[in-house]
Image (cartoon, grey):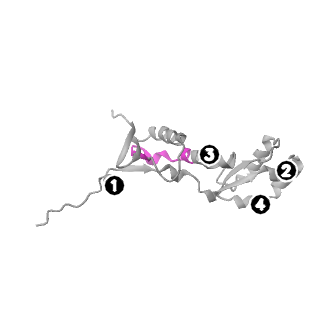
Amino acid sequence: MDTTKPILNKVAQSGLVTIDLEEYFPLEKDIAVVDLKNYLFKELILKEADFREAVKSTDWSMYSNKYVALYCSANAVVPMWAYMLLSVALTPYAKDIACTHPSHAAEIFLYRNIAAINLNEFEGKRIVVKGCGERQIPEAAYVQIAQQLSRVARSVMYGEACSSVPVFKKSVG
């Protein structure tokens, strides 16, 4: 008589949904940079007619499905409309555009990707926001996801499914 019981994965049966914020970072290869310095006369002065012609004649399709960081590496005064003009030229192609130093681009796009999460898929669910991984996640990203999920989720926890800390639980009634 066989008295062995099958091993049950209680975590898998719990109905917990895990969110890994690392997945919302754009891949490094998907981030492109447009440096306005390259559009300036002697990399210092913006000449409107020349700038407009350069923007018009650039093949922006090379930025298709890319996250684009607009910035100017030169110590030049660049009018805001120049960034706006580049943004308009890139919009049909780029996945997203931010006016930021390239070192901050991934974090900005992380926040935007979190903001774009379809919360309907988490309605009434028990959520665990993964707490550790390969990449450093800014605290602000955890604050943002907690705020968003608390509107729809049944509960929100932090950590791993096998060892989590409760953050939010919707009161019944």
Q: Is residue 46 left or right of residue 29?
A: right
The span from disc 1 to disc 2 (Cα, nearest Å) is 57 Å
Say if the magenta span includes residue 117: yes
Q: Say what secondary structure mark 1 lies in.
A: helix
Q: Name the front one of labels 3 and 4.
A: 3
Q: Which residue is mark 2?
A: 43
Q: Say what secondary structure mark 4 lies in.
A: loop
Measured as percent of width and height from the top left, residue 10 is found at 29, 53
The span from disc 3 to disc 2 (Cα, nearest Å) is 27 Å
Quadrant (top left/top right/bottom left/bottom right) for the C terminus:
top left
Quadrant (top left/top right/bottom left/bottom right) for the N terminus:
bottom left
- Which label was assigned to residue 108? 3
Q: Which residues are magenta?
A: 113-129
User: Can see residue 104?
Assistant: yes
- Mark found first going from the N terminus, 4 or 1: 1
Q: Say what secondary structure mark 3 lies in.
A: helix
Q: Which residue is mark 4?
A: 59
Say if the magenta span includes residue 115: yes
The span from disc 1 to disc 3 (Cα, nearest Å) is 33 Å
Q: Name the front one of labels 4 and 1.
A: 1
- Which label was assigned to residue 12? 1
Look at label 3 and name its amino acid: Ile
- Mark found first going from the N terminus, 1 or 2: 1
